Amino acid sequence: MSRCLLLLGILVLLCRSRIWGFSEAPITERSPRRGRRPQTPRRRRDVSGLPAQILHPSKVQRGRPQPRWQDVFRVWEREIPKADFAIQHAAKAVRLLPKVSFKHMPRQQPVLMNLLNRTKEFLLDDNCTMVVEDPLQPREGRNHRVGLVTEDAAAMMTAAVALKNVIPRLHGEVLPLLRCKVKHAVDSMSDKDVVRMLLSDGLQREVGIWKQLVARARPELMQVLELQDLAGLIQRFCSMPWVVAAAKARYKGGRARPSGSGDFLLNLRDQVAEFIEDMTLDDVGVSLWWLAEADLVDDELLKAASAFIVRKKAMRWKDCDESLWRLACSFAKVGREDLALALLKATARAVLQEDLGMLTNWAVAAMTWSYTQLESRQDGLDAFRARLSSERQLRQITQEQVAESAHIHAEAMDEFWSSRRIDTRPLFLAPRPVKLLQRMSAEADAKRAAEERKLTSRQNWRELDAVDDDEMQDLEMFRLFAPEAGEQPDAR
């Protein structure tokens, strides 16, 4: 008994000793459990000596649908307080804010408040003026221009309107200062900067600034236009009723006084007809759609568009492009079925190669209206019109909606017009070509005929008579051929 107590005491002393890895000290945050690596914060790279730069939010997106504000501001908080942080950095940060997810962000987030305060300081400074580009110097890109450039100013205004409910200070304090800067700089902008401001999205909400920019749109701007700018400018100017009215007055031959914006729109139309061969299918479709909606399409443009379709080998187009039925709608609005025959056949061929259920409701309705307006007895498209009518009935699209689809542009489409009858393309096994099947059938027939000839050429061949049902059991015992020469009969 005494030996057992002695061994028990020794075991307790050993367990309490440090040689077994136990300690009497309590486990706290400063004394972590032995064997685990203490959690130390990761050392961040020191960027205080580097020039200020604003990282794009997509760099910290990490596979999420949108980058989080925590990750973005964690990077920006080290750049905003730098001494060389200027208006171009603040403008880039503000125009990139719509790309960030502000879910569960507090109203007074320190990094965001610091960014807005520094942006206000720059805009209040008298030396902060709009940068005017020298047309004689080659452009090095927006990020290489120091100061507040035209594209950044327009993007900042668009961001302020988009984030009106999320960041009220951006819309209430920064946007008025920015409007004042741009308003005073419109008259001194270069022609290239005016074109970039006209092509900016969302700037039409600023009515005062937009009217100033439209007043600068004169035929002299055609010298600085690029080919990819034509479709966007036509869309902007055809959406303004007063510009369209002035252009119509000049186009119809009336004695209207010269209008800078109206003449500019007519010059854009002439540029499309002249350089249509170098334009993309999408730009041609957008240009003709808006010009036909404004009733400004002339015969020269229609002939150029028809020749463009033929020269681009429209019969070989295989993709169902939205521009195809935009072009069809444009020709239908003008009512020139004689020039639209090549386009109608190309569109029908491209659509029939796909499943009609994969098209949007707007595509089915717009094509139904276009092919009805351009119907001709000699076009040979009656079967395709019947397919379109059947598809329209399956989707329960009314005749009123068909007529309405001819005047709906992409920006005004709601969920109904964008929906499809079939969301995903069904999987089919690739069918064998008809010629291959015909060749295989002919080879099988020839092989069977050769076997029959070989069978009938044998000696003592005779054909079986009709066999009754009672004799079917003895059929396997019946011999078709008699023993050939040299063959020994069955000994049984």
Image (cartoon, grey):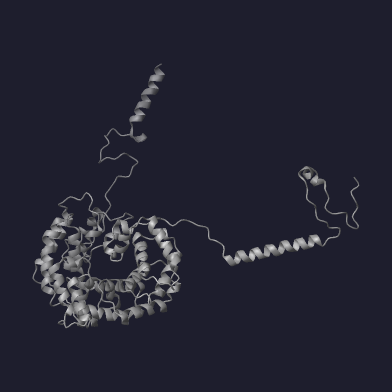
Which one is nearer the viewer's eye here, 139 or 277? 277
Which one is nearer the viewer's eye here, 204 or 241? 241
Q: Residue furthest top?
A: 1
Decide if residue 50 is on the left or right side of residue 126. right
Which one is nearer the viewer's eye here, 74 or 166? 166
Decide if residue 122 is on the left or right side of residue 56. left
Which x, y percent locates residue 101?
25, 54
> Looking at the image, how many numbered discs can be counted on the residues?
0
Decide if residue 6 is on the left or right side of residue 213. right
- Residue in the picture at 66% in, 65% down: 442
Which x, y percent locates residue 271?
28, 81
Which one is nearer the viewer's eye here, 191 or 141? 191
Decide if residue 242 is on the left or right side of residue 492. left
Position of 336 relative to 93 (above/below): below
Image quarter where the C terminus lies is: top right
Where on the picture, by quarter, is residue 264? Answer: bottom left
Where on the picture, by quarter, is residue 399? Answer: bottom left
Image quarter where the N terminus lies is: top left
Position of 406 relative to 190 (above/below): above
Where on the picture, by quarter, is residue 361? Answer: bottom left
Position of 197 relative to 485 (above/below): below
Which x, y percent locates residue 153?
18, 68
Position of 163 relative to 265 (above/below): above
| Res 149 seen here | no
Which x, y percent locates residue 319?
42, 67
- Residue in the picture at 41% in, 19% down: 3
- Residue in the picture at 18% in, 77% down: 246
| Res 253 seen here | yes
